[in-house]
Image (cartoon, helix red, strand yellow):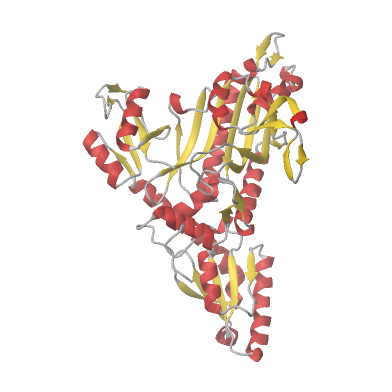
C-alpha cells in the first residue's frame, strides 16, 4: 500500500499512479495504444449510457459507419485532409503470407486503393449522404456514432491523448444555415449540461480562434475546464461545417421552391478524454474521487468481523443492506472476500474513488446504525437502518453537489484578467488557470506569446461581454478578451 506521489510534487506522476492503482487503464505495449480495464471501461459505459439518452431525447439516432475510408474520399475536403493526413494510419494490403517461419505482407495483395483508418468520419459519411439526400424532405439528418478513432500522436498520456480512443461523433445535415448553427449550439449546451450535472466539471464555452478551428469547419465551438494544476483541458467540441463537405462531395438538395442548393452541416464529439478530466478535476493525494452520478460503484459495503460466528450474522445483515439499496437503484457492491482484511479493502475503494463506504460490524447490528464514510470529505456519519432508504439518495446528491462546488470554486479563483504582459507572464508561470487578456487577432502574435510562455489561446469566450482594449503583447487594438492558458 505505497502512498501516491503528491500532486504538488509531480502532477504527471500522480495522475499516472492513480490510473494504475485504481485499475482504470494501462498502455498495451504498442506505443500509444491503451487498454481500458473493467473499472475504467465501466465509467465509460455510464458516460455513454447517460449522454446517449440526452442525445436521443433531442432527436438524434445512432448509426455505425466503417472504420476504413477510401483515400479518394478522405482527400476531397482539402483543408480537412491537410491536417488529418499527418496522423493517419493507412491500410495498403489485404493479407499476410508465410515466408519460411515468419509472416510477411503478401506483395500480391496490394489494394487498388489505400484505405485510411478513421481519424474522424466526415468524409465517409458525406460520401454516403450524397446517396441519401435529394430533397428538403430528406432533411434534417441527425445521426450519432459511438465508436473509435485512430490518430498517431507524438506524445501520449492515458485517456488524454492516445493513438486510439473511444468517442461519439455526431454528423448532421440541414436545409438552412440557421438550423445548422442552432444544432451546433444545442450540442454545445448538451455537452455543458452533461459535464456539469453528471461529471461535476464546470466548463466555459467558447469559439476557437480561426487558426485553431476544426479543419473543414466554418466555426468550432468548445467547452474547456481547468484542472487542479492550472492547465486547461478541452473536453468537447461542436463544429459548424457550413457547406464545406457538401460542396466537396457535391451533396445538393431541392429546396421547397424547387431550386438546388448545397446542404448545411455540423459535426461534434466527446471522447474517453472525459475520464482523464474526471481524474484531474476531482482526485486527491489518496486516489480517485468520482462523482456519484458516474461512479460504477456508488456504495461499497465492507464487513468487519473476528470469527466465523460474527461473520455469519454480519453477512446476513450486510445482505439486508445490499437489498435495500439495490431496490433504490443504487449501484452498490458487497465485498465479502475473506482473503483481504477490512483495512486493505478500505484502501482499495478509497483509491477507486467510491463515494460512500458502509462498514458493518457487531455494533452496527446491535444498534441498527451504520457508519458511513464519505470519500469526498473523509467525514464519518451514522445513519440508522430505518432511515437508510431515505437518507442515502440524499447523501449521494449532496456529495455530487459538493464535488461540483469545489471544482467551480477553483475555476472561479483561477479565471483571472490581465492587462500587462509582465503580469500575464507571471500569472501563467506561477498561477495558471484561464487568463482573460486582449489579443489583436493576429495569429503571429498568438504564436509569439506561445513561444514565450507556452500559453495558447484556448477560446473566445461566449459568456463574457465584449470589452475593447489593447493587445497584451502588441499593444494593437482588440475588440474583446480571449482566454489564454497552458493546456493538455
86 to the left or right of 281: right
- Residue drawn at x 32%, y 28% as measured from the top left: 448
Name the image quarter holding the C terminus: top left
Quick one: 55 or 306, which is closer to the camera? 306
Quick one: 400 or 98, which is closer to the camera? 98
Quick one: 25 or 326, which is closer to the camera? 25
Would you place residue 25 above or below residue 266 in this image? Answer: below
- Residue drawn at x 76%, y 36% as measured from the top left: 95
Counting from the top left corner in percent of width and height, residue 9 is at 35, 58
188 to the left or right of 131: left
Would you place residue 452 above or below residue 339 in this image? Answer: above
Residue 24 occupies quadrant: bottom right
Counting from the top left corner in percent of width and height, residue 264 is at 62, 20
Would you place residue 139 above or below residue 61 in this image? Answer: above
Would you place residue 246 above or below residue 368 in this image? Answer: above
- Residue drawn at x 66%, y 45% as measured from the top left: 53
Residue 369 occupies quadrant: bottom right
Inspect this view and state whether residue 441 appears. no
**How many discs appear?**
0
Counting from the top left corner in percent of width and height, residue 299 is at 59, 67
Inspect this view and state whether residue 54 appears. yes
Counting from the top left corner in percent of width and height, residue 387 is at 58, 73
Residue 388 occupies quadrant: bottom right
Amino acid at each position: 500500500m505505497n502512498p501516491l506521489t503528491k500532486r504538488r510534487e509531480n502532477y504527471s506522476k500522480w495522475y499516472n499512479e492513480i490510473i494504475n492503482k485504481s485499475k482504470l487503464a494501462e498502455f498495451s505495449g504498442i506505443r500509444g495504444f491503451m487498454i481500458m480495464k473493467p473499472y475504467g471501461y465501466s465509467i465509460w459505459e455510464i458516460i455513454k449510457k447517460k449522454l446517449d439518452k440526452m442525445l436521443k431525447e433531442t432527436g438524434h439516432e445512432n448509426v455505425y459507419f466503417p472504420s476504413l475510408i477510401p483515400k479518394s474520399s478522405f482527400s476531397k475536403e482539402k483543408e480537412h485532409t491537410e491536417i488529418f493526413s499527418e496522423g493517419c494510419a493507412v491500410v495498403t494490403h489485404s493479407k499476410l503470407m508465410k515466408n519460411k517461419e515468419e509472416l510477411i505482407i503478401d506483395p500480391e495483395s496490394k489494394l487498388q486503393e489505400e484505405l485510411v483508418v478513421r481519424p474522424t468520419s466526415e468524409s465517409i459519411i458525406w460520401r454516403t449522404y450524397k446517396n441519401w439526400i435529394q430533397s428538403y424532405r430528406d432533411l434534417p439528418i441527425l445521426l450519432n456514432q459511438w465508436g473509435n478513432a485512430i490518430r498517431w500522436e507524438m506524445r501520449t498520456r492515458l485517456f488524454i491523448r492516445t493513438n486510439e480512443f473511444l468517442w461519439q461523433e455526431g454528423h448532421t445535415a440541414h436545409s438552412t444555415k440557421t438550423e445548422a448553427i442552432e444544432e451546433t449550439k444545442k450540442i454545445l449546451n448538451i455537452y455543458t449540461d452533461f459535464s456539469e450535472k453528471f461529471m461535476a466539471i464546470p466548463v466555459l464555452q467558447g469559439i476557437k480562434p480561426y487558426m485553431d478551428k476544426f479543419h473543414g469547419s466554418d466555426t468550432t465551438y468548445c467547452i474547456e475546464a481547468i484542472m487542479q494544476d492550472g492547465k486547461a483541458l478541452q473536453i468537447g467540441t461542436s463544429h459548424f461545417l457550413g457547406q464545406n463537405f457538401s460542396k466537396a462531395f457535391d451533396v445538393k438538395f431541392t429546396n421547397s421552391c424547387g431550386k438546388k442548393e448545397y446542404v448545411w452541416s455540423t459535426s461534434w464529439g466527446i471522447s474517453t478524454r472525459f475520464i482523464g478530466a474526471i481524474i484531474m478535476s476531482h482526485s486527491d493525494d489518496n486516489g480517485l474521487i468520482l462523482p456519484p452520478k458516474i461512479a460504477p460503484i456508488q456504495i461499497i459495503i465492507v464487513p468487519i468481523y473476528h470469527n466465523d460466528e460474527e461473520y455469519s450474522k454480519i453477512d446476513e445483515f450486510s445482505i439486508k443492506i445490499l437489498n435495500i439499496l439495490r431496490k433504490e437503484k443504487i449501484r452498490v457492491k458487497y465485498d465479502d472476500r475473506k482473503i483481504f482484511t477490512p483495512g486493505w479493502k478500505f484502501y482499495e475503494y478509497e483509491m477507486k474513488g467510491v463515494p460512500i463506504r458502509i462498514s458493518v460490524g457487531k455494533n452496527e447490528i446491535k444498534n441498527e446504525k451504520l457508519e458511513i464514510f464519505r470519500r469526498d470529505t473523509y467525514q464519518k456519519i451514522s445513519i440508522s437502518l430505518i432511515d437508510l432508504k431515505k437518507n442515502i439518495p440524499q447523501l449521494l446528491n449532496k456529495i455530487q453537489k459538493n464535488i461540483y462546488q469545489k471544482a467551480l470554486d477553483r475555476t472561479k479563483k483561477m479565471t483571472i484578467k490581465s492587462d500587462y504582459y509582465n503580469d500575464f507572464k507571471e500569472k501563467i508561470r506561477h498561477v495558471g488557470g484561464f487568463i482573460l487578456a486582449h489579443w489583436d487577432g493576429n495569429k503571429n502574435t498568438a504564436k509569439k506569446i506561445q513561444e514565450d510562455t507556452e500559453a495558447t489561446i484556448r477560446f473566445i469566450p461566449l459568456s463574457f461581454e465584449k470589452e475593447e482594449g489593447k493587445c497584451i503583447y502588441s499593444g494593437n487594438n482588440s475588440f474583446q478578451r480571449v482566454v489564454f492558458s497552458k493546456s493538455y
